[in-house]
Image (spheres, rainbow, N blue to C red):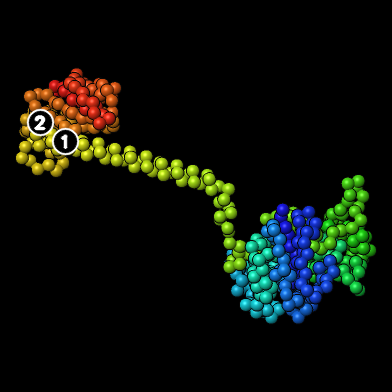
Amino acid sequence: MPLIAGWDGSRLDIYDEKGERQFVFEAPGVAKSDSGGGEAVDGLPDDAARPAVSALALGSVDAPLTACLLPAEMLLQRPFSLPFEHPRYIDAATLAQELADQAGAEEEDWWLCWQAERVDSGVRGLVFALPGSLKHELTAAAISSPCPYIGPDIAVRLRVHQPQGNSPAGVLDADADGLMLGVYADGVWCGMRRLNLGPGRSMASLAHEALASLKAMGFDAASMPLTGRLDTAWKQVFDTLPDASRINWQVEIPASEVGQPVSGLPGRQAANALAMHAAGMNAPFNFRHGAWAVQTDWSKRIGPWRRTAVLLAVLVLLMIGHDSWQLHQLQSRQDAARSAIEAAFHQALPGVAMIDPMLQLRQAAGGGASADAWKFIRQMEAITQLGRQEQAFKPQAIVYADGEVMLSGAVPDIAAANRIRDALGSILGRKVDLLDTDLGDQQVRIRLRWAS
């Protein structure tokens, strides 16, 4: 069963893909509500308020985590615009310098993930920064270190409602604990923000603040729709705002099976788990990249195919062995043919050093040699052609005398002997006699004779 974790630095909640909470791990001496906490000052975590023992160290479940979602309030987030020709030229060092200029953040204190797209003026995108201390905790914890996705919950939530293509839009996603919002344009997010309900922070105040934040991110009610998910209560609150009538509302309002609006929304962590299940492998802004990427356990991937791999390896070895045996057989026939040619050459041209027997015999015939030498060359060419045509035949000796040629060799069986006799007769255009056969050593020795 896939499990999805939500960690806020002090509490670890484990949910299944249906949004049902399965486990809760909380550090000693920490009391937190189910809302997931309030907003930290300037969007950064308060290290002094964190427990001495992390809930990550206490967490232990049988099934592996598919994702660990971090509250947006724990992360530093900034939009950026750079004069590059392509997003591939962006690296962590460049963005770290941007963060240092904007927020005074030192490069070694943060681990970054980002998304960017090319625009007319260069590249534009959004970067999230994870404090190095939190990254160290996540890496050291057995429950989260193998997790393939670690990223901001707000990015996963808004990704589910992201417009198709590059269509610009504002996006809202509400839960029982607050509201997430962002603006999407030109294929990238211009900004994201989380607003939490709490004492002195009513739905009305959050709705007013949400529209103001959307405008600050570049939302234009005249040209962009407002999409996402709200329940009836949230939509009624937004409808009371002065600017609501000018907005092209395209938000989804969950309804029950009978078509009536549902009475409430899931809590933040449950909504995060549902969104992560919907996003799947398309979840954006993953901190697990580069040196922090999850190492593939090939033993687990290969496990189901181990039997197939062994059988394939055996088959390959058998094929290599068969090819080696075939090569050995061909080499043996070649050696036998070479020996027979050498013997015949020295019989035809005694006392002559053999270099290229066929060429030397042709030169001898063309240079005024006897007619017998020329005939012998023709017989040799016929025997060579027979060797190419009948690879089962292993020639052993050739004798040329008194106007006759005697060829001896070995074949697998009697049928092959008759076939080779007929093939040689066809090549020579004359009758070839099979003089005798000798059975032994799992082969048949034969002698063939014909007039030159």
Residue 183 lies, in percent from the top left, at 77, 64
Circle 2 sits in a helix, a strand or a loop, which is it?
helix
- Mark 1 packing: few (<14 Cα in 10 Å), some, or many (20+)? many
- Mark 2 packing: few (<14 Cα in 10 Å), some, or many (20+)? many
| Rendered view: 363 above or below 83 | above
Amino acid beneath label 2: Ala
Residue 7 lies, in percent from the top left, at 74, 67
Q: Which residue is mark 1?
A: 341
- Which residue is drawn at the image coordinates 64% and 70% (left, top)? 140
- Which residue is drawn at the image coordinates 60% and 74% (left, top)? 93
Q: Can residue 325 be seen by looking at this rendering?
A: yes
Q: Can residue 87 be seen by looking at this rendering?
A: no
| Rendered view: 299 above or below 87 | above
- The C terminus appears in which quarter of the rendering? top left
Judged left or right of residue 376, residue 445 is right
Quarter assignment of residue 119:
bottom right
Amino acid beneath label 1: Ile
Q: Which residue is mark 2?
A: 373
- Which residue is drawn at the image coordinates 87% and 69% (left, top)? 197
- Which residue is drawn at the image coordinates 80% and 70% (left, top)? 216
- Distance Cα–Cα, label 1 vs label 2: 14 Å
123, 17: nearer the viewer: 17
Mark nearer the viewer, 1 or 2: 1
Residue 257: numbered disc? none
Residue 208 lies, in percent from the top left, at 88, 68
- Mark earlier in primary sequence (1, 2): 1
